[in-house]
Amino acid sequence: MKVKRCNNNKLLMSLWRIILFFSLIVVIVASSSSSSSREAAMSCDANATNNEEEEVKASSYKWIPQQQHRCNITKYSLERFQSKFRNGVLPPLYHEPIIIIQTPKHRRNEQFRQKTSRTGIAKSFPPNFTITLSSSNSFSEHRRTIPLTQYLDELEQTPEQFPNALSNETWYFFGETHSPAWRHFLYDSTNSNYQLPPCETCQPDLVALSFGIGNIGSGVQWHIHGPGFAETLWGRKHWIVYPPHAKPDFDPDQTSRHWMEYTYSELLQEEMPWECTLDPGDLIYFPNEWWHATINLDSYTSFLSTFTT
C-alpha cells in the first residue's frame, strides 16, 4: 500500500510540474504578445506624429507648391500661336516669354511623354544605367553619379524638398543627358522621338535637348543663359523670370523654393516677376539672357528643355 501511495504521489507531482510548465509558457506568450501590441501601437503613434508634424510644417509655409499660383505670362493655344506668328513659328530672339498650352485638340509628344513616366523611364534603360546629378544652386557646380533606379527610389522616399534645404547640398537630375544612350532616347527612337517646339531655329542640328526629373520643391535657383523652350511632361512646374536688366536679389546657394518662401512673399507689386505654372504638355519660351528659376510642384515631375540659337 505504501508503494502504491508513493507511486500515486510521484504521478501527482509529475502532473503538477507539467501543469506549471505549460502555465509558464502561456504567461510568456501572453506577455510577448502584449509587448508586441504595445510596440506596434507606439510605432503607429510615432508614424501618426511624424505625419502630423509634416502636415503642420507644410501648412506653416507662405508659398505652398500644391496650391494654385499667379500667372502673368501670355498663354496661346496652338491655333492662336500659329495665327499670330508668320508661318506658325516663333522668330529668333523673340523679346518676351510666352506659353503654348496643350489642348485636347492638339496634344504634342504624347508617345514621347509615355516614355518619360516613372515606369516608362525605368524601362527605357538597363537596370544598372547611371545618371549624373548636379547641385541645384545657380552654378550646378557639384556632381554625383548614381543608378537611375536609385534616384527614382529616392524621389519616392523623399517626395518633397522644403525651403531650408541648401541648394548646394540638394541633388537634382537635369542637363546631363548628352551621352549616346540619351541621344538615342531623345532623338532617335522610332516613332516616339521628341517633337521640337515651333520656332525658326528649332532644327535638330541647331538645338540641344536636356531632360530632367524632380520632386516637389526641387528646381534650379536663379540663373541666365541663351534662349530656349521648356516643356513639362509629367507633373507641374512653376517658372519665375525677370528681364536681363532686372536681376533679382538671391543667394546662389539657397534653393528657388527658399526664394519663393522668404523673398517672393515680401515683394512689392511692382517688383513681382513674370511667372506661371506649366501643366503637363505646356511649353514655355524663355528669351535670351532673361533671369529665370524653377520649382517643381509634384512628387514626380519630368520635363525637357530645348536650347536654341
Image: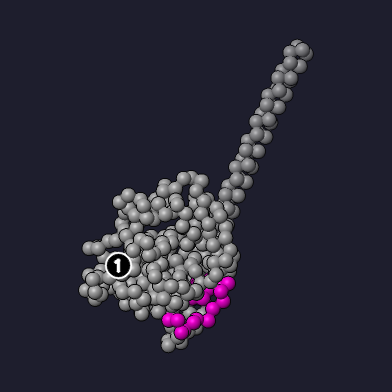
Q: Is mark 1 on a helix, strand or loop?
A: loop
Foreground pick, 45 / 75: 75
- Residue at 23% of width from left, 71% of height from top? 87
Q: Report the span colored magenta.
A: 243-261
Q: Report whether 29 appears left or right of 62.
A: right
Dividing the picture into quadrants, the one containing residue 237 is bottom left
**Above or below 71: residue 111:** above
**Above or below 230: residue 275:** below
Picture coordinates of residue 154, whole percent (x, y):
52, 55
Is residue 166 magenta-colored? Answer: no
Furthest residue toward front: 205
Foreground pick, 81 / 265: 81
Q: Mostly what secondary structure, the magenta segment?
A: loop
Can residue 56 be seen here? no
Q: Report whether 100 appears left or right of 25.
A: left
Picture coordinates of residue 193, whole percent (x, y):
34, 55
Picture coordinates of residue 284, whole percent (x, y):
36, 70
> Mark 1 = which residue?
198
Foreground pick, 300 / 133: 133
Picture coordinates of residue 292, whole percent (x, y):
45, 75
- Residue at 36% of width from left, 52% of height from top? 188
- Residue at 72% of width from left, 24% of height from top? 13
- Residue at 51% of width from left, 72% of height from top? 221
Can residue 3 be seen here? yes
- Under mark 1, the amino acid is Pro
